[in-house]
Image: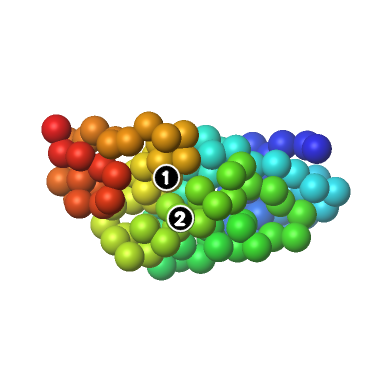
Amino acid sequence: MRAADTNLLVRLIAQDDAKQAAAAKSFVSAGAWVSHLVLAETIWVLDSVYELGPAALATAVRMLLEHDALVLQDPDVVEAALDSFTARPNLGFSDCLILEIARKAGHLPLGTFDRGLAKLDGAQKV
């Protein structure tokens, strides 16, 4: 299976360049894999460059999870991260994803200086 890069996902979501959006849609139509890193970068770009708020970011993640042609790395991990992010959007999606990746790998607690993240089950304030 092919893999998708950050800029390709951004074009699929933002639809701000018709030619690139069509090319991205064509590329993924046969199926494409999305790594955790690409997902985190995509959400960072949508947040910092496109200035999407937490609700729109959650919608973007949901769209990627439900996309017919995309396969997200460990979709159960992404779903759990999305649940945490939706409940506490001030944390940031990448923090929630980091915690859920550590949880799946069996490496808890996740040490952090982030007081908000430390409130989640599995995280520990250092």
Q: Name the residue under label 2.
A: 80
Q: Which residue lies furthest to the right in this view?
A: 30
Q: Report x, y in % for residue 53.
A: 37, 62
Q: Mark 1 points at which residue?
A: 100
Q: Which amino acid is tagged 1?
A: Glu
Q: Between residues 40 and 20, which one lies in front from this camera angle?
A: 40
- Which residue is pictured at 36% across the width and 58% down the height? 84
Res 74 quadrant in image? top right
Residue 109 in sight: yes
Vertical order, 33 against 52 (above or below): above
Q: Report x, y in % for residue 121.
A: 28, 50
Residue 48 in sight: no
- Which residue is pictured at 47% across the width and 40% down the height? 104
Q: Is mark 2 on a helix, strand or loop?
A: helix
Q: How crowded is mark 1: few (under 14 residues within 10 Å), some or many (20 or more)?
A: many
Query: Is 52 placed left or right of 22 in the picture?
Result: left
Q: Is mark 1 on a helix, strand or loop?
A: helix
Vertical order, 26 against 83 (above or below): above
Q: Report x, y in % for residue 39.
A: 54, 44
Dots 1 and 2: beta carbons under 8 Å?
yes
Picture quarter with the N terminus: top right
Q: Between residues 66 and 46, which one lies in front from this camera angle?
A: 66
Picture quarter with the C terminus: top left
Vertical order, 20 against 58 (above or below): above
Q: Between residues 92 and 5, which one lies in front from this camera angle?
A: 92
- Which residue is pictured at 38% across the width and 64% down the height? 86
Query: Is 24 placed left or right of 61 in the picture?
Result: right
Q: Residue 115 carries which label?
A: none
Query: Is 62 placed left or right of 46 in the picture?
Result: right
Q: Which amino acid is tagged 2?
A: Ala
